[in-house]
Image (cartoon, rainbow, N blue to C red):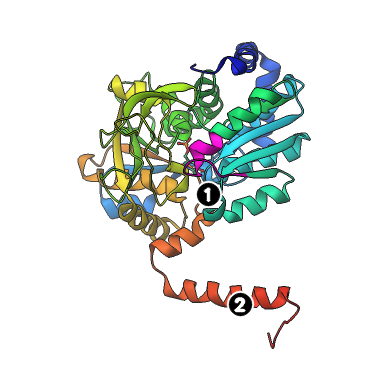
Amino acid sequence: MFIPEILFPAFHELKEKFAEIQNDTAFWQDYQDSLANFSGRPTPLTYAAGLTKYFGGPKIYMKREDLNHSGAHKLNNALGQALLVKRMNKTRVIAETGAGQHGVATAIVAAKFGLKATVYMGSEDVERQYANVFWMKRFGAEVVPVEAGSRTLKDAMNAALRDWASSFETTHYLLGTASGPHPFPALVALFQSIIGTEAKEQILRLEGKLPNRVYACVGGGSNALGIFQAFIPHEEVELVGVEAGGEGPMAGKHASRIAYGQGRTGIAQGYKTLFLQDKDGQMLETSSIAAGLDYTGVSPLLANLSERGRVRFEAATNEEVVNALQLVMTKEGIVPALESAHAFAGAFREMQQCSEGESVIINMSGRGDKDIFNIAEGLRDEEWKAFIQRKSTQYQQSCSGDSGKA
Ligand SMILES: *Cc1c(COP(=O)(O)O)cnc(C)c1O
């Protein structure tokens, strides 16, 4: 926790509440109820028959976080923190968002629990992910575009912390990933640990033994920690985190802090971890086809697990990711999010290293419907481009009252 003095009371209160709920059975009962009846948990562990046959190696299973309400693992954490807000008698939540997925999850829980919501989002990301901005507003949240710095996720996080410094008496900062100052990494990891708890039970039921490997994509680190935690005590299960390799290892073209060996220890945004930074300690620009992985820092818990050799890190490039996504779609009839497709790409590369009697789990952190624009662009789909142009013309005509002949 490396925070300005003005934020100390806010973090102190959160630390206390976090300690309180850990053994509060009524709290966990509420949490389980919300997950079951609002989000639709438990999510299945689906056997990927088509992919398994295609690679001819280990049995491939997918943990289906895409089937949560709102289409990703984000709601596990947003629901947990919203219940915490109720316990703290606060009336407003603020959040940072990059791709907008966490912003949407926050807007959803705010609507459900009758809270006011303000979501900070870099103005560059507002442009890139406008569909999510549209949904957040429809759910009743205020979306504030942040014009500072590179106008992306890290700038949104700074803006949220600034808001919190003057609003914490009524407001909770609903942080979206397992990064940031303590207790956020531990708190978010705990709310996401339901993923691995379920997956472990499910694989034991289906296979009668633990998987040989578990793969997850790594942005801030919450879905990876969510599924890894249950397997950490079992040394024989290999845990693999897959980062955004973007266009390859050249600085500024990716968001791989660990696999490319370019992240260096630093302190920023109130916490200490491996950051992509220049020689003066300024944060570097990052790049990825998956907006949700496009971040300069990484969960300090994962940086530690990497240092201890418990989690191995790999990176998948944009091109590998688009190819993996196509393969999952045609072999399984399922659309992974571009973020999740990193976990698939990382796994596919290594399927020859495992044998037939073995099994692997790939964490499918979210569904890809939200990525339709980026996937079409990644595939350079000409028919889609023409469709968007037609739609845009029609929309302009209908808004100006000139519906033409359509
Ligand atoms: C936000 C997001 C991620 C990245 O966040 P983590 O905290 O690293 O899990 C991954 N996948 C999806 C679908 C997301 O929405």
Judging by the rendered image, the residue that carries numbered circle 2 is 393
Is 96 displayed left or right of 217 in the figure? right
Which of these two is toward me, 272 or 112? 272
Look at 47% across and 55% down and name the residue there: 335
Residue 184 visible here: yes
Against 44, residue 376 (above or below) is below
Q: Amino acid at mark 1?
A: Asp
Image quarter hosting the C terminus = bottom right
Which residue lies at the image location 43% right of the left edge and 45% below the top edge?
340
In this view of the protein, which residue sits in the foreground, 159 or 183?
159
Mark 2 belongs to which amino acid? Thr
Residue 258, picture quadrant? top left
Alpha-carbon span between mark 1 and mark 2: 24 Å
Residue at the location (71% across, 76% down)? 398
Provide the residue designation for mark 1: 125
Residue 395 is situated, as x and y percent measured from the top left of the image, at: 66, 73
Q: Residue 304 sits in which quadrant?
A: top left
Q: Nearer the viewer, residue 100 or 79?
A: 100
Horizontally, is 217 left or right of 151 in the view? left
Q: Would you say residue 148 sits in the magenta stretch? A: yes
Q: Which residues are magenta?
A: 145-157
Question: In the rendered structure, are the residues bearing label 1 and label 2 in contact, judged by CB atoms less than 8 Å apart?
Answer: no
Report the residue at 49% width, 22% height from top.
Answer: 270
**Percent from the top left, x then y, of residue 22?**
60, 14
* Element marked by disc 1: helix
Quadrant hosting residue 42: top right
- Work out whether residue 38 can be spotted: no
Location of residue 250 in the rendering, given as x and y in whole percent from the top left corner? 26, 45
**Residue 121, position as x, y percentages in the image:** 58, 43
Give the SS element for disc 2. Answer: helix
Asked if the stretch drawn in magenta spans residue 15, the answer is: no
